[in-house]
Amino acid sequence: MTDAIVVKELVKRYGSLSAVDHISFDVASGECFGSLGPNGAGKTTLIRVLTGLIRKTEGEAFVSGYDVTKQADHVRRAIGVVSQAMTTDLDLSGWENLDIYARYYEVPLKARKARIALLLDLIGLASRAGDLVATYSGGMRRRLEIARGLIHRPKILFLDEPTIGLDPQSRRVVWELLQQFRREEQLTIFLTTHYMDEADLLCDRIAIIDNGKIIALDTPENHKKEIPGSDIVDVTLERDDTNEGIETIIAEMETLPFVHQVIRHSGGQESGPDVLNIYSDNGAQAIPVLMERLQARGMKILAMGLKQQTLEDVFIHYTGRSIRSEGGKKVSYLIGAGLPRRWGN
């Protein structure tokens, strides 16, 4: 397979802030490549550079064989884009939204009508084609936006947080659509998300991004194999402000033969309880032993649970914090989430 996207030492700075910091990777033709990270990690900035919306500061980036800076027009014709904000026109019908977009790409009339009819049928909106988009639900609008991004048969589809704000059922419908389009149209997909289940289900490879850098890049399965231990025991303890007792018990647990690693965090709250993620072999058998050790040290256990490793745990493993502990980010429908607010006023 040839490379659909090639990125070498890419940098995007806003003053002294490096939103994208010397990132390098490639995406094979036909691959679904995921960019996973918290709000503010640099995911949206990266996608804006690759789609020609903003100019890079340093490095190189090629999309469908074209330089994103020197051959931006060629790049734009080769790609489809579904942005984080919904941008379909509420005052037009579903058909009209697709038709006007196809005209931008100079799709001939006969081909345009056939393509619109096909896409509306595939996304389940054929019966609502003549209705104003203002009457659509959020899930229907998102499906329409995916169809709009594919109206000109692009080789590569960029999706920036495609299911943000959707209910679980609508998210699954979007996932099924993306998998279908990828199969039937030999589509390369570049997806940014902070939903672990979305990345795990859709992506062949995932780049975990934090603070503008790629801190890990591999398949979902290999990401999970990087973490020692088959299970994770989550223990929530009453906070130890002295740190002495908690540090002692962590050191003691790490000497146990079935424990590979113990990570302590506070769920993003300075005054919150202590949370320990204990990476262990055979967690069901480990729990009684761990509980006995904690109680012997006078630790008050608030909660304890067992789970198999997920991409959430991979993120914690590399960054030391949960992706869900990151604060929400306010999104402007004019500039989106990829631009620091002080630059978007």
Image (cartoon, rainbow, N blue to C red):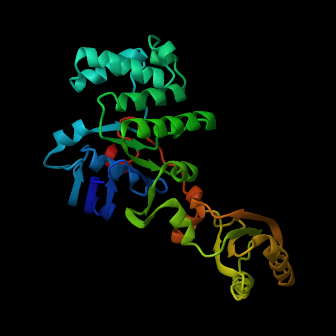
Front one among 47 and 232: 232
> Percent x, y for residue 225?
56, 70
Give the image quarter of residue 184: top left
Instruction: Judge left or right: residue 282 versus residue 134.
Output: right
What residue lies at 61% left-to-right and 76% top-to-bottom?
A: 228
Q: Check the picture and name the quadrant holding the C terminus.
A: top left
Residue extending furthest toward the left: 70
Instruction: Judge left or right: residue 94 versus residue 292.
Output: left
Question: From where the camera sits, is residue 84 visible?
Answer: no
Looking at the image, is 136 positioned above or below residue 71?
Answer: above
What residue lies at 37% left-to-right and 28% top-to-bottom?
A: 148
Give the image quarter of residue 309: bottom right
> Percent x, y for residue 71?
14, 45
Q: How many marks?
A: 0
Front one among 155 and 335: 155
What residue lies at 51% left-to-right and 22% top-to-bottom?
A: 124
Instruction: Judge left or right: residue 13 versus residue 34.
Output: left
